[in-house]
Amino acid sequence: DTEVTQTPKHLVMGMTNKKSLKCEQHMGHRAMYWYKQKAKKPPELMFVYSYEKLSINESVPSRFSPECPNSSLLNLHLHALQPEDSALYLCASSQGPTGGAGNTIYFGEGSWLTVV
Amino acid sequence: RKEVEQDPGPFNVPEGATVAFNCTYSNSASQSFFWYRQDCRKEPKLLMSVYSSGNEDGRFTAQLNRASQYISLLIRDSKLSDSATYLCVVNKPGGFKTIFGAGTRLFVKA
């Protein structure tokens, strides 16, 4: 079973709503990620936090706002989303920079988001 | 050229068959290579890391060829439960970016 936990597992929200996705990892990892995955496509990187600081923002629209309250927690705040934002949102973590040898990414089970 | 390219699927094989997937990558400086498995409507799960010397885990064997910049995954004695999408994953050197191949869908039939 994954040691990265995400809540909620399913979320339906209107285009004017504000909601948040939450992620927690208990592996002592220093890097945490948000990925977006659409059907029949590979995961697409959105944000990376390293040592609680935003390290990468892959030009994600501002209606998605990440937050890293501490080294174990990662949130994704959602506001004024569009129907095309409906997807599986995956949180992940790794011990360190994945560019180095041996740093594996571990995924949570994901949050299924539907924007209506 | 895509940074990571995988065999287009789907692969349809009978139980007990041996199936091989190939993956090529473009950045010769990449150091970390993985195969992930993703079941329908589930998260990707690490299947195995890929090492230069090749590595085996039960029915699964992964190989890395740095000179030709490709990675392979061999599944022997396929089971129905092996049906999934297999993602080739290569890490970009020096940072946090991980490049996923598009995935190869495997269907194992009785």
Image (spheres, coloured by chain):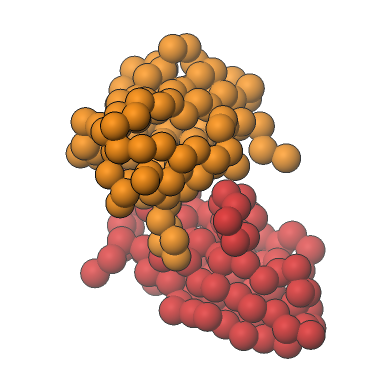
Chain colours: A orange, B red
Q: Looking at the image, how many numbered discs can be counted on the residues?
A: 0
* Rendered location of residue A47, percent (x, y): 34, 34
Q: Residue at x 44, y 79 (%)?
A: B8
Image quarter for residue A19?
top left
Image quarter for residue B61?
bottom right
**Which one is nearer the viewer's eye here, A96 or A64?**
A64
Would residue A41 be found to the left or right of residue B74 on screen?
Answer: left
Q: Residue at x 24, y 69 (%)?
A: B1
Would residue B16 be found to the left or right of residue A54 on screen?
Answer: right
Q: Residue at x 49, y 15 (%)?
A: A71
Q: Residue A96, relative to residue B110: is it above or below? A: above
Q: Which residue is outermost to the top? A: A70
For residue B94, say whether it is visible: no
Q: Residue at x 79, y 85 (%)?
A: B110
**Which one is nearer the viewer's eye here, A19 or A96?**
A19
* Rendered location of residue B59, percent (x, y): 76, 69
**Which one is nearer the viewer's eye here, B60 or A48?**
A48
* Rendered location of residue B23, percent (x, y): 45, 70
For residue B88, say whether it is visible: yes
Q: Residue B25, relative to residue B110: is it above or below? A: above
